[in-house]
Image (spheres, rainbow, N blue to C red):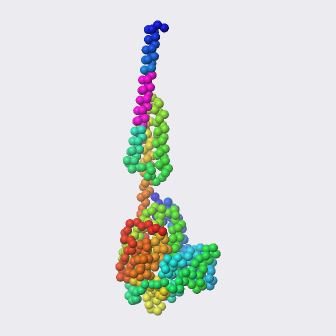
Amino acid sequence: MSAEAHRDFACFGGRATVHIRGETTQSGEEAVDRARERLLDAHQRLTRFSEDSELTLLNRDPRAAVPATELLQTLAAAVAEAGGRSDGLVDATLLGGIERAGYRESLGEHRPVSLAEALAGHTGRAPASPDPAARWRLVGADPEAGTIVRPPGVGIDSGGIAKGLVADLVAAELGAARAYAIDCCGDIRIGGSAGQPRRVAVDNPFGGGPLGELRIVSGAVATSGISRRCWVGPDGAVAHHILDPASGEPAFTGIVQATALAPSALLAEVYAKAALLAGPEAAARWLPHGGVLVGDDGEAEFVGIDSGTTAIAVAA
Amino acid sequence: MDPIEKLERKREAQRRLRAQRQRAGLLRGRVVAISLIAFVLLWGIVFAQMATGNDPVLGASTPTTRSGSAVAKEAIETTVPKELEPEANELEPIEEEPVEVEPEFEAEAEPEIEFEEPEPAPVTTSQS
């Protein structure tokens, strides 16, 4: 019987963890190393914090149609899909806004604040709205020409979309694995031919023990939140990295964390972010496969599932 | 031929006919008895196999199941010709059969253990 191989490493600005059990222990070890290399390679190519990454070069390119690798084309297609699936709430073309808010490079130059401080420092609560300009509609890939099409000046922020997307791409190459979990900084794709459920703890944004535990056989889970990466911006206001597309300002909607289940990690990320941005009244509508919402007051609401629920296989 | 000699020949013919019928009946009885014993023994093995929870059909590997069938088939093939041999030798191969078959079925228990794979490592979803 083979053992499950594990790798834990820094990637996409956080920690990525890969768990794979192959038909044999050796095949699992080889697969987990390939997955790690694939994730690190994708990070290097899709980060906006590197001067020579493919994404940075794309964002700086003055042409309307830019030759791009298959991975970058897939990201561009994912930007359009995320916008379409979320009615424009998940908008990956808000790069200018996130940089104006102070998230330009690392956050080392800004004073980090805790979630409690951030919530206390911002009084208003309102659901986010889509940007009427809907620039995400203008982003797309032309696979035949091998180019990405978007108006010059429209910058793409890979953000959570890239994490979910890459988790899916890596998982797609693990057809022979008995069990796997590709955890790309909280966006997790789970599956395997053994059909065994894997326990997934839902993190508590206010600290302490997990909010609950899910058991997932196949599918994906992702969490979007504002508990990390809160800082005091250049203007002295509290900021974080999830923006209201309509205003371009950090969104304080009354929900601080949303966890979503979905057939793919990309879709789970989109649902989670849309639920957070929609605010308490409309958040549940963005969790068609179930999820967990955490409000400003720390109360957790399980939508469509129970904590410790029996094994879930999220259907496509 | 005088009537006495004719009667003697007739009696002799009747005696031979009776003896022939007796031998045929004896042989037929032996064949039936041996077939019944072989049948009961083989199904007894199958019953014991199933009762101990080692159903070959539920085994993980197809070759193992095929091996079990092959053993049973072989047992039948080796039993039938021996029914024509003298009675004293006929039962011996049948009594040896369980010794040949049981190790095959015991080997099938191993794949079932493979179903009990360890639980996958838990993961945590948190803000990305």
Q: Main secondary structure of the magenta part?
A: helix
Residue drawn at (48%, 41%), measured in percent from left and top? Answer: B73
**Rendered location of residue A254, percent (x, y):** 39, 83
Q: Is residue A269 magenta?
A: no
Residue drawn at (49%, 77%), measured in percent from left and top? Answer: A85
**Quarter of the figure with residue A37:** bottom right
The furthest residue to the bottom: A235
Camera-side residue of A136 and A213? A136
**Quarter of the figure with residue A306:** bottom left
Q: Is residue A116 left or right of residue B2?
A: left
The furthest residue to the right: A145
Residue drawn at (53%, 83%), measured in percent from left and top? Answer: A134
**Rendered location of residue A271, percent (x, y):** 46, 76
The vertical placement of A35 against A13, above or below, is: above
> Which stretch did the figure color magenta?
B20-38
The vertical placement of A6 against A129, above or below, is: above
**Rendered location of residue A141, percent (x, y):** 59, 76
Residue drawn at (48%, 91%), measured in percent from left and top? Answer: A234
Q: Is residue B24 magenta?
A: yes
Is residue B37 visible in the rendered image? The answer is yes
